[in-house]
Structure formats: C-alpha cells, structure tokens
Image: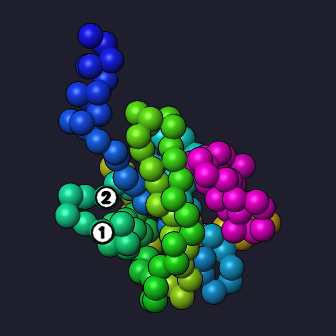
Amino acid sequence: MLPLFHFLRRLRHGMTLGVRVLAVDDAQRVLLVRHSYVAGWHLPGGGVDVGESAEAAARRELKEEANVEADGPLALAGVFFNPRVGGRDHVVLYRTSGLIIGPRPERNMEIVAAEFFAPDALPQDMSPATGRRVAEWRGAPAGDRW
C-alpha cells in the first residue's frame, strides 16, 4: 500500500522548480541576499509561478529581492537537483552582468539585506550551495546538485 501512496503523491505534486541568479556588477562583485527565514547569504531567486517561464521568474526575483534588473540576456549556467526538498526539486541557475541597480531595497518580511561582494571578500556564512555556485563561477568544476 505504501508504494502506491508514494506513486499517487508524486503524480499529484510533481516536480518543483526554482531559480537563482548569479548577478555580477561592473566591478565583478556578486549579488547576495539575506532572507528573514533562513540563515546565511544566498543568490537571489525563488519559485517559478504557474504559467511563468524560468527566465521570467529569475528576472522577477532579481527585481523583487534586490531591486536589480538584468540589462541583457540571462545565460543559463545549469540545472541542479536539490535533494533536500522532497526529492523532486530542481533549481535553474542563470548568470548575468550589465545590471541596472536601483536604490537599495528596504528591509521587508522576506529580504533583510541585499549586497554586492567582491570575490575576495565573500561572507563566511554563505549557504553551501551559494558557495559552490560562486566557486564554479570562479573556475571550480561544476556539480549537478544544489
């Protein structure tokens, strides 16, 4: 009976999809955000809404979380399996530069800080996945898990 339950649950819930953006300014600094509900610094991003493309979600999250817009294309950097969220979650990572940076957003219920960091001055409390993605941007071998 239990395998049938898991099968039906998968049919009902399906795969989840999130996006993150590795945004780099003209000084080669990386944009990171700090959430109110989870520790550490993260790449901006979030879930893809029903009827929304992954790229549109990435652009929306970048604007909502940091008041930053990509002034050009987003480059697909990878699709990563996230085993910590239900076993069916994937994260699409985009990279972009040529940013339009608006005024620093005020703290809100979701985002308490959005800052650019130089590669040699990254915060120690980045999430492990954020650390891996930044390391890959700097030339480390790419992985397939978030």
> Range of the magenta residues?
122-146
* Quarter of the figure with the N terminus: top left
N-terminal of the two: label 1 or label 2? Answer: 2
- Nearer the observer, 126 or 75: 75
At mark 1, the secondary structure is loop
- Asked whether residue 21 appears in the rendered view, the answer is yes
**Residue that label 1 marks:** 53
Q: Is mark 1 in CB contact (under 8 Å) with mark 2?
A: yes
- The circle on residue 136 is none
Q: Is residue 124 above or below residue 32?
A: above
Q: Is residue 111 above or below residue 27?
A: above
Q: Residues within 10 Å of mark 1 (few under 14, many from 20)?
A: few
User: Where does residue 17 sit, x and y in percent of width and height?
Assistant: 37, 52
Is 130 positioned to the left or the right of 45 in the image? right
Is 3 positioned to the left or the right of 22 in the image? left
Name the kind of residue labelled 1 in the image. Answer: Ser
Is 75 positioned to the left or the right of 12 in the image? right
**Residue that label 2 marks:** 48
Numbered circles on residues, count:
2
Q: Residue at x 51, y 47 (%)?
A: 81
Q: Is residue 124 part of the magenta span, yes or no?
A: yes
Q: Residue at x 26, y 19 (%)?
A: 5
Is 98 positioned to the left or the right of 57 in the image? right
Q: Residue at x 20, y 58 (%)?
A: 50
User: Where does residue 45 sit, x and y in percent of width and height?
Assistant: 43, 60
Helix, strand or loop for the magenta stretch, by majority = loop
Name the kind of residue labelled 2 in the image. Answer: Val
